[in-house]
Image (tube, rainbow, N blue to C red):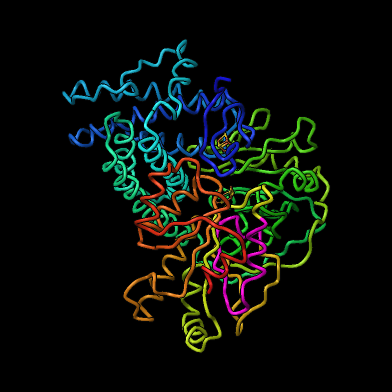
Amino acid sequence: MENQMFCYQCQETAKGTGCTIKGVCGKLPSTSKYMDLLLSVVRGIATIEYNLRQNNVESIAEVDHFIMDALFCTITNANFDDPSILRRVDAGIALKKKLILIAETNNVVLPSYREVEWGGEKADYDHEGDAQTILRTENEDLRSLKELTMLGLKGLAAYYEHASRLGFYDKKITDFVCEALAIITNPDADMNTLLNTVLATGTNGVNVMALLDQANTTAYGNPEISKVNIGVGKNPGILISGHDLHDIEDLLKQTEGTGIDVYTHGEMLPAHYYPKLKKYKNLVGNYGNAWWQQKEEFASFNGPIVFTTNCIVPPSKNANYNDRVFTMNATGFPGWKHIETNTEGHKDFSEVIEIAKKCQAPIQIEEGEIIGGFAHNQVLSLADQIVEAVKSGAIRKFVVMGGCDGRFKDRNYYTEFAQQLPKDVVILTSGCAKYKYNKLNLGDINGIPRVLDAGQCNDSYTWAVVALKLKEIFGANDINDLPIAFNIAWYEQKAVIVLLALLSLGIKNIHIGPTLPAFVSPAVLKVLVEQFDLGGITTVEEDLKTMIG
Ligand code: SF4
Ligand code: SF3
């Protein structure tokens, strides 16, 4: 049967090779086609913009934001709403036309790629979308490198968006994004150029995570060790999901004194670790687990839910929460309301608050507390204690187990791996992968908890900073000589940029799972294995032997 669509960007892709009929995530063929079309428009815009910048021609300020937002909205589980994708396509075509005019006026010669030249006729959208699937690049190795770059850029764009909402920008990063997109648009790009672009994407991944770290800590202070309640109170609540700290700040300010409590969900949990967010008394706890359990958890939460970013799981038609979910930013879902950002960069949550007032308090699904807040500043303030524990042999090894969680059973591997780790090994975590082991009560080593949670997936940056610091303290020649193993779980494209960032720092021997990405071809995998000793996972027992010894 002919493909209805083609997408292989996430770990749960159908049969481990690609979704061709409908996304395992729930993405429809129409959405996939319009996303392909949008990405084609983005490649065209970026190519023109790259050429303008190369010629020092002043362009249009909105280009960077357009590119970042468009990339972000095609991330797994961010946007299922065709009209909102098509609005971006329309806006992109209008922008592209303006850029072409600027190029013509300034005698900048543009490459004759289809993405640059296509006129954007509305009647042609469906056909052009079909023509722009990933499979248009026939050579599987070139395709693989192009997609590694594209998917890394999607993750990078997400992190850049968060930083820019807090007023942090970096032109070197946005220049690189245009350049990388221009390179992967070129039908004649060769293996070497593409491989270098993949590696440069990783370098820019480090820079974007550093930028976001700077943005978050400047706005909200350095994360500190914090206990987070996982039970519920008696007031009605609003549940906030996703990664955007600027949005939760807006919500906390607007709910203060209203009698409405705010609960975090999924990747918003680390909001509790920041001094300037945890100070709000109406931020009362974290409700539920990683994204994939949201259907049951939203049903029992009783109050409104707001999505600042991915991961959305399409609800059942008759889910009891459909009339109380709101999307924002790059996210969207048909039938759910969307809250726009105003011209000052803020959200108005008054409608959400009014709904909350009429809702019952959440039903308790768990009780107790979890602990987190071990971002680099906090960890480094414990450096003496940690170094002492390593020197005395009380801590034998660290294992970085960050990344994403997912819905398939094979991910129980990570729970079992955490449970079976020797008692003198400490887990360093970040991202929603933590929910596989952050409630296991794995104890502590001389007061240092055995699960140190730095924060969101972008806070994997912390483990790079900590590794570099330990290298200095221990006087190691190579970061790979430190007693740190990497066992990363991936699902969507933020994990791709995190992985590329770690590789660009020279970290070797990273294991990724539960399966290897479908978009990495055998030949590209061979290169990654040869250069970085990148590997997959096997069984808990085997991997404990190879990673811990
Ligand atoms: Fe399939 Fe993942 Fe793409 Fe969804 S995001 S269509 S599950 S590969
Ligand atoms: Fe999770 Fe979606 Fe990736 Fe930020 S919320 S890590 S999967």
Q: Nearer the viewer, residue 457 or 535?
A: 535
Q: In the figure, residue 79 lies in which quadrant?
A: top right
Q: Number of labelled discs?
A: 0
Q: Is residue 478 magenta?
A: no
Which residue is drawn at the image coordinates 36% and 30% (left, top)? 43
Which residue is drawn at the image coordinates 52% and 73% (left, top)? 398
Q: Nearer the viewer, residue 245 or 255?
A: 245
Judge from the rendering whether residue 382 lies leftward or rightward of residue 115; answer left or right: right
Residue at the extreme top = 123
Q: Is residue 432 magenta?
A: yes
Q: Where in the figure is residue 147, as x and y percent of width and height?
A: 41, 38
Q: Which range of residues does the magenta coloring cover?
A: 412-436
Which residue is drawn at the image coordinates 50% and 16% (left, top)? 126
Q: Where in the figure is residue 81, as x and y percent of width and height?
A: 59, 28
Which residue is drawn at the image coordinates 29% and 25% (left, top)? 99
Q: Where in the figure is residue 16, as x and y percent of width and height?
A: 57, 40
Q: Where in the figure is residue 257, as x and y percent of width and height?
A: 70, 55
Q: Quadrant of the N terminus?
A: top right
Residue at the extreme bottom = 392
Indicate whether 157 appears above or below 535.
above
